[in-house]
Image (cartoon, helix red, strand yellow):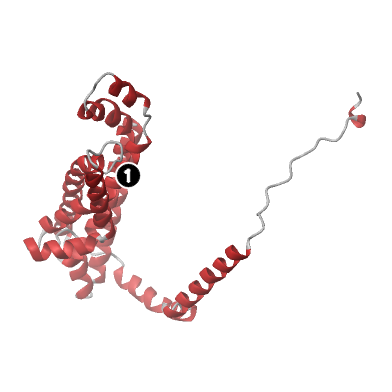
Amino acid sequence: MPEHLAPPVQRALPARFEPTSPISFMLWLVVLGFFAWSVNNTGVSLSDLWGGIPQMTRLVGEMLPPSTARLEAVGWSLLETFQMAFVGTVIGVLLSVPIAIMATPHLSPHPLVYHVARNLVAFFRTVPDLVWALLFVVSVGLGPFAGTLAIVIDKIGFCGRFFAEAMEEVDRGPQEALSAMGASRLSLIMCAVLPAAMPSFINTALFSLEKATRSSVVLGLVGAGGIGIELKVAMDLFNYDEAATIILAIFALVVLVERLSAVLRKRIL
């Protein structure tokens, strides 16, 4: 059949938004109204932002060029910051595994244990790491140990949730086969669940290290060790050129950890 006589090809219409129900429309209006109210209560002002640009320009001018007077002290504080993040992440990840197992419905030994583990993980995840740092500073004193403990608790809350979800999503076939052969719960976990969930575990653990590196900087502001206290002292004394050096050092550390994490993901996963 000649092409000009062929029937026209029916093309699918592009996807369109479905009509909004009256209830959904009212909910959207409530959300938009609350957003507008929140903008007003938070004092968002473009005029104030525009008026603050000269002050920001002056601050940046005082930061340049960055000071090199205390590079050695900044370097040691930066190393302490990474050590806090590394130790806290490793311990937190290791402690997260058994807690995540107890927080997985089909692996937990008892429903009560499951609910306790779930609520514990939720509680650790809900309380900010800065609050944990303040509590540990009061408990064990100033220094990196308090910051490390805060990171451990934060990682248990973060990794515990994702580890449990990863174990819930693994294929149940191998587990059912081992159960039919009479394997114990521990054998089932070690031979079927953990190997299948290990790629997700590794990915979550590496992301946790990146997150802990950034968090450990803030923990120093409350006396929990690391380079955060150096930044706070520099800003309090108006040594903005020294603060610029510290900010650049923090940036370099975070970028380095993220690059190494990406390389490890490609090699391991």
**In the image, is 199 to the left or to the right of 95?**
right
**In the image, is 39 to the left or to the right of 191?**
right
Looking at this rendering, what residue extends furthest in the left direction? 140
Please indicate, yes or no, whether residue 69 appears anywhere in the rendered image. no
Is 65 rendered above or below residue 5? below
Task: Looking at the picture, tell me which residue is in the foreground, 65 or 16.
Answer: 16
The amino acid on which the numbered mark 1 sits, given as a three-letter code, is Phe
Is 12 rendered above or below residue 60? above
The image shows a total of numbered marks equal to 1
Residue at the image point whose x is 18% and y is 51% from the top? 152
Residue at the image point whose x is 26% and y is 71% from the top? 240
Q: Quadrant of residue 90?
A: top left
* Residue on which the image places disc 1: 162
Name the spot of residue 48 as percent of width and height, x first. 44, 81
Task: Looking at the picture, tell me which residue is in the foreground, 166 or 205.
Answer: 166
For the N terminus, the quadrant is top right
Name the spot of residue 223 as percent of width and height, x first. 14, 65
